[in-house]
Amino acid sequence: MPDVTHGSSAKAPSKFEQLKDSSGHLKEPLLTELANDAANFTEGAVQILKFHGSYQQDNRDNRRKGAEKDWQMMLRLRNPGGRVPGSLYLAIDELADRLGNGTLRATTRQAFQMHGVRKDDLKEVIGTIVRELGSTLAACGDINRNVMAPAAPFEKAGYPAARKLADDIADLLAPQAAEGSYLDIWVDGDLSYRIKPSSTVKSVKARQQEGGVFSGDAAEPLYGSTYLPRKFKVAVTVPGDNSVDLLTQDIGLVLFSDPQGHAQGCNVYVGGGMGRTHNKEETFARTADPLGYVAIDHVLDLLQSIVALQRDHGDREQRRHARMKYLIHDRGVAWFRQELEAHYFAHPIKGMRLEPKTKLEDYLGWHRQSRGLWFVGLPVLCGRLEGAFKQGLRRLVDTYKLEVRLTPNQDLLLCNIGTSQRASVRADLAALGYETPEETAPLARHAIACPALPLCGLAVTEAERILPDVLERLDVQLQRIGISRSVLVRMTGCPNGCARPYMAEIGLVGSGVDQYQLWLGGTPNLSRLAEPYLERMPLEALEATLEPLLQAWHTAGGRRSLGDFVVKSGRSTVQEWLAAGAG
């Protein structure tokens, strides 16, 4: 193994690194504290709990001076490519009603979140998910997170190969010793629920015990006892389909296939990431750099090699500087590739293959899945499933034995609909208000927001709960001006970037109570980073602030997207328009 940053540093390991190292592969103090009568976990157990797919939260709407906090757990599933079998969906729907707050939420990483679970009920909830062949392992924590892929179940072009690659990567990068701890805690050590990778993945995973990829820990050969410096994100897609926000990932793969759909290889991008901290200029959003093209036979080896490189060289002293994007920013992609080839990866990395222009696909409405099967995409603003809509979805999934798939845009696909079922499903959807799901409001079609208040401990202001009102206000303004073209809007309650606002044409990033940073200049196809223009814009001033900019865009004819118009106009001109609007 090469001389590594965290191994050669004279400084003692950070408190968090020590916690991971002493946890017994992510078991303690979580296991011990699950058995006590406290309503909440201590900080050490909270940090280990994240690796098991859960965050501890308190409902800030229920805070009362002198009273105990309303402690509850948010639970996140592991669903590569957003696929949720019908039986698993029915199980988590029932759990949300019985032991959660009655809602489910589709996340921007294509997984379901459940809120409102009490500490005493956590083992029953996670255990039930595992027994229904789901998992929450590594949905959070310093480890590879849910692997993204186009949600559409097309049986054409490279889509099946992309979904398979995402599944293989999820299995390849799953922790080994920690999986044992996970099963010990949640299903009393029943090993029949272990992840069962394909023979191809098994053979590649065996090489985690070799060379620079080996951590030195035989039980956890890829990650070692301290796992990764921070979270790690991977997405796979096909040429032209940017539903996965490819450039925001630690590793983004564009999978090329032959005319028969057989995988050939991948263009590889590295070093993307959205998280940042207000007033900390050393933290920033970043889009990934092209690394090169790798033949399909070596892609899985490349993935675990990159993870090993980040394991060894990522910053383990400053957590806000620990993502792989900072490593590549500081040392350069040329160094990254040289280090990769010298110590971790023994196969050719060729020049990038030419890709077509990408599009933010959403798959809303009806589509042919394969011969005799259909799927329908339903817009779900902010991804929140609740009330009559949630009840109706349960009936649909149960009655027609459907599969659910989640998109990175927080929408939901109902899949495996037989031709003979289409009319009945259409009628049932119409009764739920989805008569023409492909005709959703233009601004709402691609807008996303993070949960923010009241449950997220990092939120400084609202996002999900007020996004519908913000979009309605913007829609009224655009119509009044005479602009018919849509705009990509994203909103978060803090700068951590869970809704990827830094890629939007208009990004609203919480910076205070009812105040937001204003980011402008992203693109409708998610190919360029936006820039910050205002640090603290009161939300009530949104329309007035944007008015001169939108009027100028309209006067110019609106032929360019708003993001392109902002970039073409130049920063100083745009700032003048915003200042005039803010008055």
Image: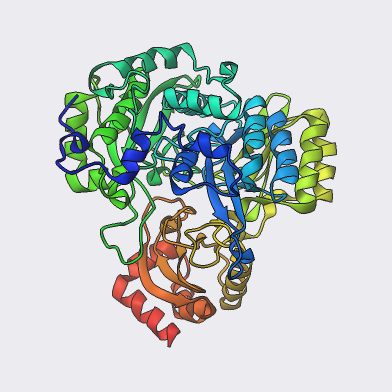
Tell me if residue 434 can be seen: no
- Picture quadrant of residue 296: top left
Q: Locate the N terminus and report the quarter of the image it occupies.
A: top left
Q: Locate the C terminus and report the quarter of the image it occupies.
A: bottom left
Residue located at (41% from left, 66% from top): 519
Residue located at (66% from left, 36% from top): 125
574 w.r.t. 448: above or below: below
Residue located at (38% from left, 37% from top): 252
In the displayed structure image, the side of residue 521 where residue 58 appears, left or right: right
- Total label count? 0
Q: Nearer the viewer, residue 255 or 2?
A: 2
Q: Which of 508 and 208 is in front in this view?
A: 208
Q: Where is residue 364 in the image (x, y as percent from the top left)?
A: 64, 45
Q: Position of residue 470 (x, y in %)?
A: 59, 69
- Picture quadrant of residue 523: bottom left
Q: Where is residue 90 in the image (x, y as percent from the top left)?
A: 74, 35
Q: Position of residue 130 (x, y in %)?
A: 62, 28
In the displayed structure image, the side of residue 402 where residue 17 appears, left or right: left
